[in-house]
Amino acid sequence: MRISVNGVSHDRDVDIRTSLLDFLREHLHLAGTKKGCDQGACGACTVLVDGQRINSCLALAVQYEGRQVTTIEGLGTADALHPLQSAFIAHDGFQCGYCTPGQICSAVAMLEEVRRGLPSVVTADLAAPLPPPDRTELAERMSGNLCRCGAYNGILDVLSDALARGTA
Ligand code: FES
Ligand code: FES
């Protein structure tokens, strides 16, 4: 199959049972995407496909033939951090960091969903223009990404700041 990951096209023979997560980690050696639960419950494996967030542990790699996959390695580098990576550092948005790549990939897509005016389950009025999301709404929108270290206050600070500044 042919798949684009972080702007690089890869032609690989892959067992059709290989998850996208295992393909990224074991075949392409992109270990930034983490395996937490391996069953869709924690969000540690979140990546972007054509700009939308998915749990890569629940996806088969072959499903994404011809698509554009972005992992944490494709968002920023050590020398040129993505604005959200810088914000996670500035606001203490992590402790062990295991959930952080998934949190950041998820946040990139979530902020785009907010910009597009997509409602969430806690949006009060679906007919009204979407107001700037408060911390409760941001927490709901990120509820698919768990943090075992409990760095949620810092993560919400990151997201509130990114929205206020329009930096991510
Ligand atoms: Fe995919 Fe937990 S490893 S959701
Ligand atoms: Fe440790 Fe989130 S920073 S799990």
Image: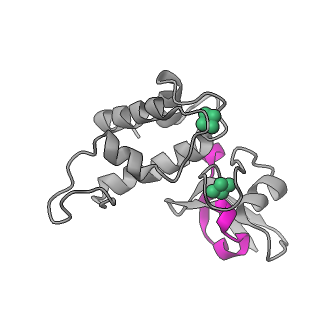
Q: Does the magenta-highlighted stretch encompass residue 69?
A: yes
Q: Quadrant of the C terminus?
A: top left
Residue drawn at x 45%, y 49% as measured from the top left:
142
> Residue 164, relative to residue 35: is it above or below?
above
Q: How is the image coloured?
A: one colour
Quarter holding residue 100: top right
Residue 133 image position (x, y, % from top left): 28, 45
Residue drawn at x 63%, y 50% as measured from the top left:
71
**Residue 98 visible in the picture:** yes
Residue 47 image position (x, y, % from top left): 60, 55
How many labels sit on residues? Answer: 0
Quarter holding residue 72: top right
- Quadrant in which ligand 2 is drawn: top right
> Would residue 37 appear left or right of 121 to someone viewing this image?
right
Residue 119 image position (x, y, % from top left): 29, 60
Q: Does the magenta-highlighted stretch encompass residue 64?
A: yes
* Outermost left residue: 128
Q: Quadrant of the N terminus?
A: bottom right
Residue drawn at x 53%, y 31% as measured from the top left:
151
> Residue 25, relative to residue 11: is it above or below?
above
Q: Closest to the observer: 114 or 27?
A: 114
**Residue 7 visible in the picture:** no
> Would residue 156 appear left or right of 86 to someone viewing this image?
left
Residue 76 image position (x, y, % from top left): 59, 38
Quarter holding residue 68: bottom right
Region of the chain picked out in magenta, as a range: 56-74
> Would residue 39 appear left or right of 128 to someone viewing this image?
right
Q: Closest to the observer: 6 or 143?
A: 143
